[in-house]
Amino acid sequence: MAKCPVCAETFKKHDIDSLAKHFQMLNDRNDAFHVGWLREYVPMDNYNGAGFSKNLAAFFSIPDGDVKTWMEKKFIDRFLGDKPHPFIDAMQRPKKSLFLGFAAEYYFFLKQKIKSCSYVIAKTDKIEIQRFEGKVIMPELINPDGSNSSQMTLLIRMSESLGVSKDVIVNGVALPPTIHSIKLWNQISETDHWLEIMAAVNALDMLNSKAMRDRGAKFDLYNKGVLDNEWVPDQVKVFLNFVVNPANDTSQESLTLISKYAKELDMTEDVQSTFLRSLDAFDRHLQARLTRAKQFEGSK
Ligand SMILES: [Zn+2]
């Protein structure tokens, strides 16, 4: 079904005209969330003209029929394009405090990711999907190769190498934007279809994926020159290498699965809408990593 990408109100399948009317009504009422979304994604001088519904349809249209391509483009435009997200921009010239802000907020994201992927496993009967999600989360939990090299462990070691104890990370409290975003991801996980959970959570791993360069990204998660800096402790380099290591990158596989089942289950519109809601939440979480970095800066 068509679904509002801001408030999740539902409409009949392919009923873009009703979705457009919904946006027009809330734009006239100056609803900050819907107005903000329109300005960001479908900028126009006048939303009450006949052209709006057409432009909204164009925004959701998938020229090559593959929602994977559409998701990659929207993600790059928002985070990795010519005007990258401020967090990505900061990661091109990082300071110690930025790594700490990254670790402190990302820790909570990873905890929610384990929960959300588990919801997918519980909600589907498809072994292919359960195997995939198992591959994503099990190394975070049991380190089957005995190397104790889960992302969470490496994240804590990175913080310790920068003078911040495990206790501060593990027993800390996330900033309000991260808490708000995690609530959304958890709510999607509890109430929505497993395919939408994948679109909301697994797809976000595009941020760390080297494959995005081939899709048009102008930036990587961090500037490679960072690894040459002598002041950067080894544990930071180990963490960064792990995060962007293609061997740990499940984002392309998740997008391929999402695209396949969006077609099979006729759920492309649901996937698009839930993905867009998640991008807003992710944006706020990345901003929180920066805010947290500033707090570390002040305390060091
Ligand atoms: Zn709405």
Image (tube, rainbow, N blue to C red):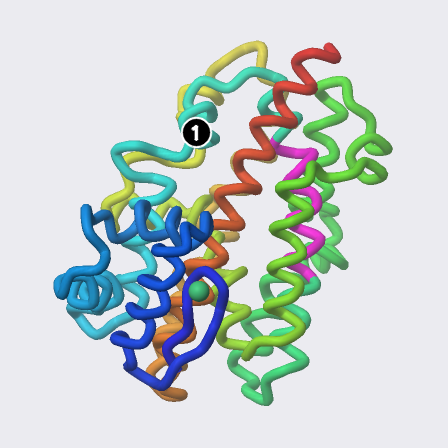
Residue 147: x and y in percent read 72, 47
Q: With 210 as the anchor, is 146 left or right in this view? A: right
Task: Specify start and end residues of the magenta stretch as a single range.
Answer: 102-114
Which quarter of the rendered picture does the N terminus lie within?
Answer: bottom left
Residue 225: x and y in percent read 41, 20
* Mark 1 C-beta to ligand 1 under 8 Å: no
- Residue 254 appears in the rendering: no
Who is closer to the viewer here, 231 or 35?
Answer: 35
| Residue identified by numbered label 1 | 86
Q: Is residue 267 above or below residue 197?
A: below
Q: Name the residue located 19 percent from the left edge and 46 percent from the top edge.
A: 45
Q: Residue furthest front?
A: 29
- Residue 277 appears in the rendering: yes
Q: Decide: few, some or many residues near mark 1? Use Cα within 10 Å; few <14, some 14-19, many ≥20.
A: some
Q: Give the residue type at disc 1.
A: Pro
Residue 244: x and y in percent read 48, 42
Q: Is residue 164 above or below residue 249?
A: above
Q: Is residue 35 magenta?
A: no
Residue 214: x and y in percent read 25, 48
Q: What element does badge 1 sit on?
A: helix
Q: Is residue 253 above or below residue 219?
A: below
Q: Is residue 106 magenta?
A: yes
Q: Quadrant of ligand 1?
A: bottom left
Q: Name the residue located 35 percent from the left edge and 74 percent from the top edge.
A: 259
Who is closer to the viewer here, 242 or 222?
Answer: 222
Q: Name the residue located 61 percent from the left edge and 60 percent from the top edge.
A: 185
